[in-house]
Image: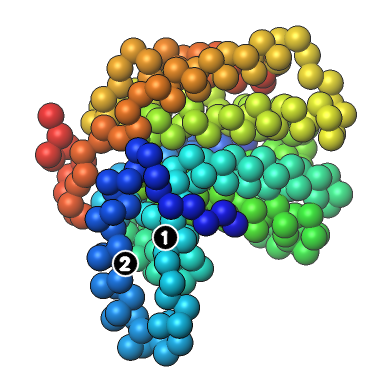
Amino acid sequence: MAHERGNSDELQLTREFPAKVLGSHRSNAILAPGVLENRSQPLRLRTGTVIVLLVVSNVLGNFSLSRGLHQVGRLVSFSPWPYIHAFLNPLVAVGVLLLMVWLISQLSLLSRVDLSYALPATSVSYVLTALMAEFLLHERVSAERWVGIGLIGLGVSLVARTVPRTAPAHKFGDLPYEGAQ
Amino acid sequence: MKWLLIALIVIPGTIADLLNAMGMKRNGEVYDFRPRAIFRLIASLARNPYVGVGVPAMAVSFFALMALLSISKLSFAVPATASSYVLETALAKYILREHIGWRRWAGASLVGCGVLLVAI
């Protein structure tokens, strides 16, 4: 996993952060000995890195799930057992693990940027999915789909040129409308 | 059945995105990705009511996706889950109070159209 420091646009945010991190670690070190030796630098990921992680884990997760589930067979049931059985398939298990990485990176991304910024940014995964369908699953990618891929790319590049975060920060427990103009 | 599953993917998925966005904005920005920090994050999210509802809603959406993946092709299943870009952008404006300028509207619309085309 890449160990990156925020340079460029995030410098300001990462500068004020270590105090907070060290503070919370000090209290943790009392509970868990051995933390002190491991506590070098927080593994900070830039927003762009989180988006890449998110897209890749989403695409590979969906891909291996799809593969695994086709091996498992038809799975439409309201009973949990067929689903639990499906988890025993290695491809399904890897897929689920990757989708957990996806969940964590999705939540981290939403903690930093607007939902309306995160959504198009992550839609790159549809482009990658279509490319994988073409080259790895050998499903035919039609002309319409290539146009769609182009439109997604165009939309993403437009949204990428906006300020990532405009949503007000709320204190925990506030109503969503408070503090917003 | 396919379309019922798509409704079960899209509606809880939209609710999950909104609640998770609200919950994570309240949680504070996440920058540390060491395993220990991630466990701490998960522990703090377990007490966050927005994420507490958002993640189960995401799970409903996810199991519906699993079911759909098992009866249809990947290229049908995945793009069909993304029919709500413009809707979610509008909800982000009115519920999350995000500033949506022309670039975001145009971007969301283009992505929505693109996803529709990819889904055909």
- Rendered position, B115 above or below A41: above
Name the side, left or right, on which A140 lies relative to B95: right
- Rendered position, A5 above or below B82: below
What whole-number distance in Å separates the C-alpha atoms at marks 2 and 1?
Answer: 8 Å
Task: Give the quarter of the image for residue A7.
Answer: top left
Q: Amino acid at mark 1?
A: Asp
The furthest residue to the front: A7
What label does residue B32 carry, if any?
1
Q: How many marks?
A: 2
The residue pinned by badge 2 equals A21
Query: Which percent across, then down, holds residue B92?
Result: 32, 30
Q: Secondary structure at mark 1?
A: loop
Query: Which percent across, then down, holds residue A59?
Result: 67, 40
Query: Which percent across, then down, holds residue A98?
Result: 64, 53
Please say if the residues under marks 2 and 1 sit with CB atoms less than 8 Å apart: yes
Q: Amino acid at mark 2?
A: Val
Q: Quadrant of the C terminus of chain A?
A: top left
Name the side, left or right, on which A1 lies relative to B104: right
Chain letter of the residue beneath label 1 in the structure image: B
Q: Nearer the viewer, residue A52 or A68?
A: A52
Q: Is residue B72 visible?
A: yes
Q: Secondary structure at mark 2?
A: helix
Whether marks 2 and 1 lie on the same chain: no
Q: Nearer the viewer, residue A35 or B38?
A: A35
Q: Quadrant of the N terminus of chain A?
A: bottom right
Chain letter of the residue beneath label 2 in the structure image: A
Task: Give the quarter of the image for residue B17.
Answer: top left
Name the side, left or right, on which B25 lies relative to B71: left
**Residue at (80%, 59%) from the top-left corner?**
A89
Q: Nearer the viewer, residue B5 or A43?
A: A43
Task: Give the quarter of the image for residue A178.
Answer: top left
**Residue at (80%, 50%) from the top-left corner?**
A68
